[in-house]
């Protein structure tokens, strides 16, 4: 995974099922992602019409945690490529992503340690 594909929090939008379903405008993929999240987080299955995201740094629609995320704003204000370069990493704002996406934590930890 090239660091350039990674967004501020360590996630890669191109790997997210909601992003992929939105880019393909595919309701079967939206349904599959909604069912995956329902199992993963023990929540009701979302409506397919609610599974839409055009990516972290786009002007378009975002959903779930990404719709209200302050990580992007914070990192941009600090002029950082991602949170791995932040002196305050890992901060409380990253708690949700770090808890639910160990792969993001690992990527950011590697950057923090100077490994890419
Ligand atoms: S909106 Fe926030 S949580 Fe979502 S991908 Fe961007 S930085 Fe990560
Ligand atoms: S304080 Fe640092 S680690 Fe936390 S969200 Fe802002 S840039 Fe990321």
Image (tube, rainbow, N blue to C red):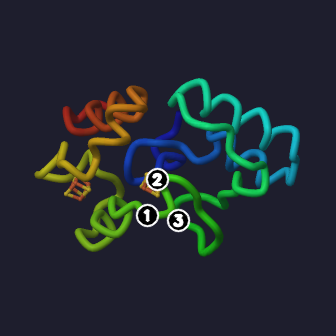
In the rendered view, tell whether residue 104 sits above or below residue 69: above
Write the residue at 22% across / 35% down: 114
Q: Which residue is mark 3?
A: 57
- Residue 71 falls in which quadrant of the image? bottom left
Instruction: Tell me the mark number nearer the camera, choosing from 3 and 2.
Output: 2
Q: Quadrant of the C terminus?
A: top left
Residue lying at the far front of the rendered structure: 44
In the rendered view, tell whether residue 16 sits above or below residue 38: below
Tell whether circle 2 marks a residue whose Cβ is less than 8 angstroms from ligand 1. Answer: yes
- Residues at circles 3 and 2 in contact by the CB criterion of under 8 Å: no
Residue 116: tell me if it is visible: no
Q: Which mark is residue 91?
A: none
Quarter of image, ligand 2: bottom left
Residue 105: tell me if it is visible: yes
Write the residue at 19% across / 43% down: 90
Alpha-carbon distance for marks 3 and 2?
14 Å
The mark that comes first in sequence, 1 or 3, is 3
Question: Residue 11: where, in percent of width, then height?
Answer: 47, 42
Q: Which residue is mark 1?
A: 68
**Helix, strand or loop at disc 1?**
helix
Q: Nearer the viewer, residue 78 or 29?
A: 29
Write the residue at 35% across / 58% down: 81
In the rendered view, tell whether residue 98 sits above or below residue 56: above
- Residue 32 falls in which quadrant of the image? top right
Q: Is residue 87 left or right of residue 10?
A: left
Q: Which residue is mark 2?
A: 65
Question: Residue 44: where, in percent of width, then height?
Answer: 62, 37
């Amino acid at each position: 995974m090239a660091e350039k594909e990674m967004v501020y929090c360590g996630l890669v939008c191109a790997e997210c099922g909601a992003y992929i379903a939105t880019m393909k405008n595919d309701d079967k993929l939206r349904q599959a992602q909604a069912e995956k999240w329902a199992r993963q987080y023990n929540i009701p299955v979302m409506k397919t019409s609610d599974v839409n995201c055009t990516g972290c740094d786009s002007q378009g629609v975002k959903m779930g945690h990404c719709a209200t995320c302050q990580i992007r704003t914070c990192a941009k204000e600090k002029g950082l490529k991602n949170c791995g370069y932040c002196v305050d990493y890992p901060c409380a704002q990253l708690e949700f992503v770090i808890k639910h996406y160990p792969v993001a934590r690992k990527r950011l930890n590697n950057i923090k340690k100077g490994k890419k």
